[in-house]
Amino acid sequence: MVKAVKGVLIECDPSIKAIILKIDSESNEYIVEDLDDYALVIKESQLPRLKEKLEEVGVVILGGEGGWKADVVVV
């Protein structure tokens, strides 16, 4: 039987995508589908946790309801 998973389309720079792929490789609980060099589908239920993980590694999340933008901050 097919199981549906509610997802969110994330479009980002390849550098941010590489960070997301690295985070997901540890537990495989965030990414539903890797679409191309700039896009991923993330499990909607895991989006807040993914944002926290990105902030832990120095990625600043900007935005709100209409979407978000991620920038890498080098310290």
Image: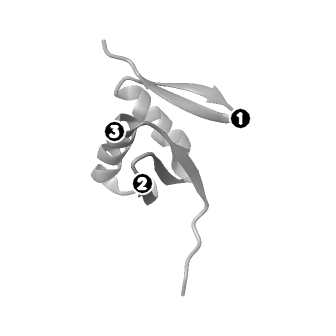
Find disc 1 in the rendering and name its residue: 65
Badge 2 or badge 1: first in the primary sequence: 2
User: 18 or 24, which is in the foreground?
Assistant: 18
> Please, which residue is most extreme toward the right here?
65
Question: Which class describes the residues within 10 Å of circle 3: few (<14), some (14-19), or many (20+)?
Answer: some
Please state which amino acid type lies under the numbered disc 1.
Glu
| Label 2 residue SS | strand
Measure the alpha-carbon separation of dots 2 and 1. 24 Å
Mark identifier at residue 2 = none
Looking at the image, is mark 2 or mark 1 nearer the viewer? 2
Q: Amino acid at mark 2?
A: Asp
Query: Residue 62, image x and y in percent?
Result: 57, 24
- Please identify the quarter of the rendering in which residue 47 is found: top right
Image coordinates for residue 21, horizontal then vertical, percent: 34, 47
The residue tagged with tag 3: helix, strand or loop?
Answer: helix
Q: Position of residue 41 (x, y in %)?
A: 51, 55
16 relative to 42, above or below: above
Q: CB under 8 Å between callouts 3 and 2?
A: no
In the image, residue 63 sits, relative to residue 18, either above or below, namely above
The disc, 3 or 2, on the residue closer to the chain's N-terminal end is 3
- Callout 1 environment at 10 Å: few (<14), some (14 to 19), or many (20+)? few
Residue at 67% x, 30% y: name it: 64
Circle 3 or circle 2, nearest the eye: 2
Badge 2 crowding class, 10 Å Cα cut-off, few under 14, some 14 to 19, many 20 or more, is few
Which residue in the structure is indicated by mark 3?
A: 19
5 sits left or right of 57 in the view: right
Q: State the CA–CA distance, disc 3 to disc 2.
A: 15 Å
Helix, strand, or loop for circle 1?
loop
Q: CA distance from mark 3 to mark 1?
A: 23 Å
Residue 36's disc number? 2
Pinpoint residue 17: horizontal percent, then vertical percent: 38, 42
